Image: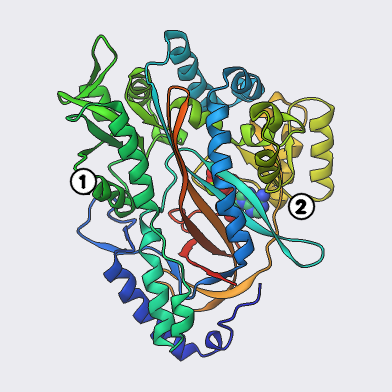
């Protein structure tokens, strides 16, 4: 996609002045992160990295992404309730991936004991890139869906004002007015509030599980603030606090510091480094409780890359979402090529294709949080090493999406202002609430655009690669 800010990108002096104004506005709006030096304190904070200009996104693709979000909510919810599908899909992976195996163990224990919670809450974010078709037109292709700790709903509500400001400074007032308003944190909080209400105890609290060293605290606070505005109290605690002070009563109600917990919202617990033995025990305790977990362990497993790959197999969506051909068609239209690496002929063929054309594929382990995928030469070496081992089943192979690059400036604390070639990733936030078998809420609640320089294969804002952005619909 060409940039319509082309003429502004040429004047270096003007860009620097514009960047100063944009940064000041970002700070004033609360587009903030704690610093890497002091991740557990808000004494010194800085702006979260962002693009100087909003990036062009075709309106049709934005609409398509919004339109399919409720379908993805249904799909994730269906997978999370299908024990046979989860068990079969993850069977080869859990043999070799200890993290997924550990999550799966908890899942099995909870199933065996009987699931105590009756209300289910999903807060997810489905991410896409814009694949360049052979004829040059862009197509919406899903990168992944995040079913645990989907972040930046809070900061994404603050960035539209910054980009409007930039365009207004340039006298582009009509363009400024076209930047969409966005408030995912409000919608996410509405989901939590609904789950809290259905849990049905006026004095019960929401427990936000977070790390002490959390740079992205202001993003989380945006949701806390929305809940407090609805008179729902939130406490922030670590897994360690749960293991020290948490308990279940005979009805498996969860208590922490003597207070009943209605909803547990995880902003931690999605990668191996976030668990020690104590934390695993705390996670199990939480899962066994009748509190609404966001997500429950089954929904976290539904968000693994292995599940994503199996969902793309012919006929699978039809089984999970019977009698809903239109939903299935909308979902499938967003799928990129996904390939199993399980031992056997199918996996052998996928590996052969990836080795023959490494630039067309991405190798993905069962990990979240950015920086884990393998590309190019690294992918080739790993595939050569794993070729004949069962370990290869802990990875999936994915078609690499190649969006058309465009110019923009990525503003980061301490970095010079310069124009670089970029690509974007669009995320849509989805919220659903189910009580027993009845879906009582299913909606999309906003978007997140992240942009990175083309020199980086992987992504992640906190990982230091991508920056916050806004879609400029064209
Ligand atoms: P994570 O769970 O670590 O966020 P992702 O699947 O989202 O894993 O991959 C991380 C990043 O790698 C993405 O944000 C994107 O920039 C890049 N990426 C992932 N899959 C693809 C793909 N199929 N094509 C191109 N880039 C990809
Ligand atoms: Mg991702």
Disc 2 target residue? 360
Residue drawn at (29%, 68%) of the image: 29
Vertical placement of residue 136 versus 429, above or below: below
Observer-nearest of 43 and 300 = 300
Answer left or right for 293 relative to 457.
left
Answer left or right for 257 relative to 332.
left
Answer left or right for 157 relative to 228.
right
Vertical placement of residue 313 versus 25, above or below: above
Observer-nearest of 372 and 33 = 33
Element assignment for label 2: helix
Crowdedness of circle 1 by 10 Å Cα count: few (<14), some, many (20+)? few
Residue drawn at (42%, 41%) of the image: 149
Image position, residue 32 (x, y; %)? 32, 61
Q: Which mark is residue 214?
A: none
Image position, residue 183 (x, y; %)? 38, 57
Q: Which mark is residue 228?
A: 1
Which quadrant, please, contains the N terminus? bottom right
Mark 2 or 1, closer to the camera: 1
Q: CA distance from mark 2 to mark 1?
A: 47 Å
């Amino acid at each position: 996609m060409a940039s319509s800010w082309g003429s502004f990108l040429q004047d270096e002096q003007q860009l620097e002045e514009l960047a100063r104004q944009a940064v000041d506005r970002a700070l004033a709006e609360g587009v903030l992160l704690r610093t890497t030096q002091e991740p557990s304190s808000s004494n010194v904070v800085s702006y979260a990295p962002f693009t100087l200009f909003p990036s062009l996104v075709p309106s049709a693709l934005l609409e398509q992404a919004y339109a399919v979000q409720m379908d993805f909510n249904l799909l994730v919810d269906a997978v999370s309730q299908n024990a046979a599908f989860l068990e079969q899909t993850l069977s080869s992976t859990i043999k070799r991936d200890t993290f997924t195996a550990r999550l799966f163990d908890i899942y099995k224990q909870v199933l065996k004991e009987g699931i105590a919670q009756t209300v289910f809450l999903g807060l997810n974010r489905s991410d896409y890139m814009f694949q360049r078709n052979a004829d040059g037109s862009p197509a919406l292709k899903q990168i992944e869906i995040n079913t645990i700790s989907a972040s930046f709903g809070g900061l994404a509500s603050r960035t539209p004002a910054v980009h409007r400001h930039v365009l207004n400074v340039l006298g582009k007032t009509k363009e400024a007015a076209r930047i969409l308003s966005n408030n995912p944190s409000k919608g996410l909080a509405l989901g939590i509030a609904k789950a809290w209400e259905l849990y049905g105890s006026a004095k019960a609290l929401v427990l936000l599980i977070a790390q002490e060293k959390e740079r992205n605290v202001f993003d989380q606070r945006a949701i806390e603030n929305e809940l407090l505005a609805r008179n729902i109290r939130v406490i922030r605690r670590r897994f360690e606090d749960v293991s020290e002070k948490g308990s279940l009563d005979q009805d498996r109600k969860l208590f922490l510091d003597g207070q009943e917990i209605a909803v547990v919202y995880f902003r931690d617990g999605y990668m191996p480094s976030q668990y020690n033995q104590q934390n695993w025990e705390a996670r199990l305790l939480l899962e066994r409780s009748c509190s609404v977990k966001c997500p429950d362990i089954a929904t976290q497993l539904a968000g693994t890359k292995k599940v994503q790959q199996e969902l793309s197999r012919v006929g699978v969506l039809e089984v999970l979402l019977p009698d809903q051909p239109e939903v299935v068609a909308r979902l499938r239209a967003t799928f990129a090529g996904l390939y199993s690496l399980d031992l056997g002929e199918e996996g052998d063929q996928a590996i052969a294709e990836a080795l023959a054309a490494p630039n067309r594929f991405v190798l993905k382990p069962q990990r979240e949080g950015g920086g884990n995928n393998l590309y190019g030469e690294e992918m080739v070496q790993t595939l050569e090493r794993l070729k004949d081992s069962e370990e290869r089943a802990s990875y999936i192979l994915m078609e690499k999406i190649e969006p058309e690059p465009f110019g923009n400036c990525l503003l980061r604390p301490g970095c010079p202002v310069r124009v670089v070639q970029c690509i974007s990733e669009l995320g849509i936030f989805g919220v659903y609430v189910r009580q027993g078998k009845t879906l009582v809420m299913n909606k999309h609640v906003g978007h997140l655009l992240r942009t990175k320089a083309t020199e980086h294969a992987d992504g992640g804002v906190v990982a230091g690669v991508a920056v916050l952005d806004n879609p400029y619909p064209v």
